[in-house]
Image (spheres, grey):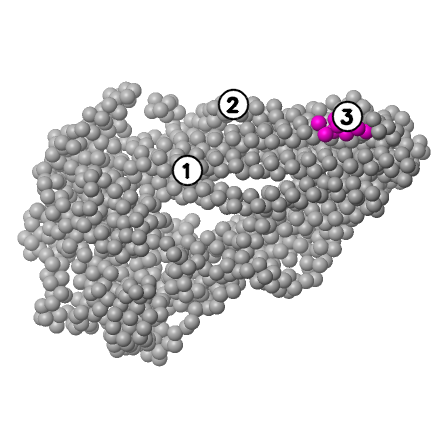
Amino acid sequence: MTSERHSHSIGAPESAVRSVLGGALRERRRPIAAATVLFCGHQAGEALVPVLVGVVIDRAVATGDPGALVLWLTLLGLDFLVLSFCYRWGARRSWYADVTTDQALRLRVADRVLDPRGGAETGRLPGELTSVAVTDAKRVGVVAFALPLGIAALAAMAVAATVLLTSSLVLGVLVLVGTPLLLAAVHYLGRPLERRSGPEQEAAARASGVAADLVEGFRVLGGLRAQPAAVTRYVGASRAALAATLGATRAQALYQGAVLAANGLFLALVALVGGRLAASGVISVGELVAAVGLAQFLVTPLQILGWVNGRLAQGRASARRIGEVLSAPFAVGTSDVNERHSRAPGASESAARSEGQSAERSKGELSVREALDGVDLDLEAGAHVGVVCADPADAAAIVRALARESATPAVVTLDGTDVTTLDPTESRRRVLVAAHDAVLFSGTVAETVGAAAVGDVGPALAAAHADQVAEVLPDGLHSAVSEQGRSLSGGQRQRLALARALAADPPVLVLHDPTTAVDAVTEARIAAGVAALRAGRTTLVVATRPALLAATDRVVHVVGGRVAATGTHAALLDDPSYRGALG
Amino acid sequence: MNRELLPVASGDRIRVVLAGLLRERRGVVLGGLVALLASAGASMAVAPLLGLVVDVVVQRRGPDAVTAPVVGLVAAALAQGALAVVGGMLVARAGEGLLADLRERFVARALSLPLARVEEAGAGDLTSRVTSDLSLVGDAVREAVPNVARGGLVIVATLVGLAALDGRFLLAALVALPVQALTARWYLRRSTPLYAEQRRVGGAQQQQLLDTVGGIGTVRSLVLHDEHRRRVSSRAADVVALALRVVRLQTGFFGRLNLAEFLGIAAVLATGTWLVSIDAASVGTASAAALYFIALFTPINETLFLLDTVQSAGASLARVVGVADLGPAPERPVGEDGSVAVRGVRHSYVAGHEVLSDVDLDIPAGARVALVGASGAGKTTLAGLVAGVHVPTAGAVAAGRVGLVTQEVHVFAGPLADDLRLAAPSASDDDLAAAVEAVGASTWVAALPDGIDTVVGAGGHALTGAQAQQLALARLLLADPPVAVLDEATAEAGSSGARALDEAAERVLVGRTGIVVAHRLVQAATADRIVVMDAGRIVESGTHDELLAAGGRYATLWSTQQG
């Protein structure tokens, strides 16, 4: 997988399109080929229906021959059987190709996003990236469905053309030239509609967006008795949407009327020419009926071709976006310093395995050179150290240096080993950074806390006072945490996130502002609990809350990007600038 | 989980509501239907006119005799088109107007529901009604209903046309009817639950992707890649399996309709052969009957296929009307001044599980009270009762107009100024600027791309948690209630913006009665009175100095927080 990803050189969208779209279609070539053959059979069967009806009229209705009636109705029945069978299995095969392509691409995008080396999300909002994985994958999938349909539509046109041209050259040419011209005219008529449908959809989307947004802010509105103002605002959006939609529906009605009239006029033309030919004895009555039927029939495959063409264009654009995500550069290498070594096939996996064993044995001796320009940190194994920064940006920078999410100037050494020589997964297993904005994933409370756990989660739950969170929830530890923990209060979320990090029991744990939404009473208990649980394990607490800092061995006070003082929390309290930095 | 979902309207009630909405625009609806029917009638002329062409040929009347029926075809085409334009416009106008009335009525009711009722149902219930149900009803009114109406009218007109040719052609065509009716029933029974399941599973996969992508930093730091890969891929198999079940259902549906088509056309052709042989009909009439029936294939398939959309929309409509029919929240009588009186209040969210017991609290107008205590002590419940968000199980709360700001912040999508004006619709630009200034937000607001007119919230400029909380305080200032309740209103900021927010909260409370649920004791220390709560009761009450001197819980807490 790794070498394949590297072969998509960055910023080569054309090759990305080819590899994503072409690769996806090649992988499903069997169902696509089967569906193509079956859809061709279906279209041919549909084309034959009016032809066979014409034959029945010629040979049975006009002559009153019951034997001919039975014979030709049987053949018509067989035709229905074939077209129905072909449609059934063609649709099943092409849908299979469609949904499996869609899902395979979705998983490839998810795999790239989940690569420990990161980088896929750089410069993309979560919604955008999700839409690449969902909408764009779906659009490429639809190509697998559209392709057999398009080929079959071409085949149907060929069948219709053959039938028409063999009965009458003039009528055949008229229908074959006239139908595309008719559709071109219809397309031309529809263009103002396309232009209108954009703003209409926007206005409608805005109205429904406003409603959803107001409902989401339900409590805020209730707290300020602002519901009447909110309703007034919604009615405004709704009326604007109505005005825009009415404009578009007028255009839509005009278009539909024009299509009906154009179809009818073309039919009249075919009837005129065909009728005159038949009246002059050039063609038979049955051939006239068939020609009229085929003129109507041809509209469908031509519309299908137009639709397929649109899907192909969309599919190409979507394949390009998927290709861009798949070939996004990694944020951190398997080894930031020695790229070549780790690129060797299988190297990172075997390295991870051997290092995985040593993670257990890691002493947790941490040293950070230039966490900031003038800040070096040294934590002996088992140290419990606090960092207080006057400027929150400094605190964030120190945490970033340890998280190894992106290349930073800091040099982080663990047990004497530069962490950038480790696989990113391995270095994060050893140095776990519990970010202030860590996200809770859906699952029960027990699953959430146990996500990265080593052994029993009980002690971690207790230390973070997350057991109390579980107690007040309806199903205790089995209560569902949904929508990224939005069903919980900020304090409850923080305690679960803290318990989750503690349960992972890493050699080095970095906690960034872990208790800002927790009340003072609970915070004091958590500070003591964390200190007790982490005894003998290295812990760095980047925070400003006194209770947390009081529980550390020593605190590093950073002012203006430099270490101003180091000492116990109690000793530093004498310094007014230190007290001022506390929250 | 025993959730008391919001109500769903009965079928009778939906009919009453729809009838009322239709009656309001009776003229437009009737005009539209008549025009569509006339358009369908004009299209009925096509087949007999083609039949006339056939007769001209069969009777050898010469090429020029073709002209007359062709002129008829031209007239039919033009009439059909023109009437469809008029009918389409009128039906769309009625449908869109009806939809707008319905959604406005729904949103107005939804926003004035009591919070307790919404919470009881789960936030997702109301959200799904406002998003997916409203849009399903909208799609049906926009796409399905006009097409079903048009298709139905074409079918009726065609059958009438067949009967006009000869009643026996109509009887022959009806051979297809039992098969079509059974197919529709077979399909509708299966489609609605299957499509609902498909939407649910598809939505779950999308939610999982959003969860994973949005929390990718957390996934990396905790090394949860394998678990998340498993979560995403396990749903993929479900999505594929369901899609294949859907296609099997749809191909089964169309396969059965193919059978109906064959039975019908065979019966019509056999009838034609018989009628021609007994000289009851011409070959042209028989051809017209066959063409009529072929022309029915598409409208019948489309109409029956759309019945499913209409049926699902019916279920959504029941959920929309259910909320639109609810009464507004009972309003608590609002006191004259800013004093607050809480008398003998008990409260439980779940029967038998009391979270507040015997709480009495009197706050004179203009005083500031801080609520302190561990999580679960009942601070937020007490704050909510004072704010009128909940009605106490027992006892009484009397207060003036109360404004509440909690740690739950929401930035309303749209220009920042519009967000602020939700609290005070008539506020001038100067009022807004003053409120922004007072909460210390003027610097970052000025730095936004379009200043106070910058589009913020979902889809717009993203604000930080601290900025959103400043915004919440500015709204409170603009709403200008005599009593303000701040429930951990400055908690979300983290250490970065906490101090600025504390100062903003101070300014917002000037000149009001204030109740502040505080996490950090420095916020509490300056209050006129500190109320310490534990297990649903008030256990200590007094000024900072009094409580320190008393040496109780507060004093202990204070000493730990000061290190």
Q: Indicate whether A368 appears above or below B389.
A: above
Outermost residue to the left: A571
| Residue count near mark 1 (Cα–Cα under 10 Å), binned few <14, some 14–19, many ≥20 | some
Dot 1: what SS?
A: helix
The residue type indicated by label 1 comes to Arg
| Residue count near mark 3 (Cα–Cα under 10 Å), binned few <14, some 14–19, many ≥20 | many
**Is residue A72 a member of the stretch shown in magenta?**
yes
Q: Quadrant of residue A75?
A: top right
Instruction: Identify the residue position indicated by label 2 in the image.
Output: A29
Q: Is residue A173 left or right of residue B125?
A: right
- Part of the protein shown in magenta: A69-78
Q: Chain of mark 1?
A: B
Q: Quadrant of the N terminus of chain B?
A: bottom left
Instruction: Identify the residue position indicated by label 3 in the image.
Output: A164
Q: CA distance from mark 2 to mark 1?
A: 24 Å
- Front label number (2 vs 3): 2
| Residue count near mark 2 (Cα–Cα under 10 Å), binned few <14, some 14–19, many ≥20 | some
Instruction: Identify the residue position indicated by label 1 in the image.
Output: B235
Q: Position of residue A104 (x, y in %)?
A: 44, 30
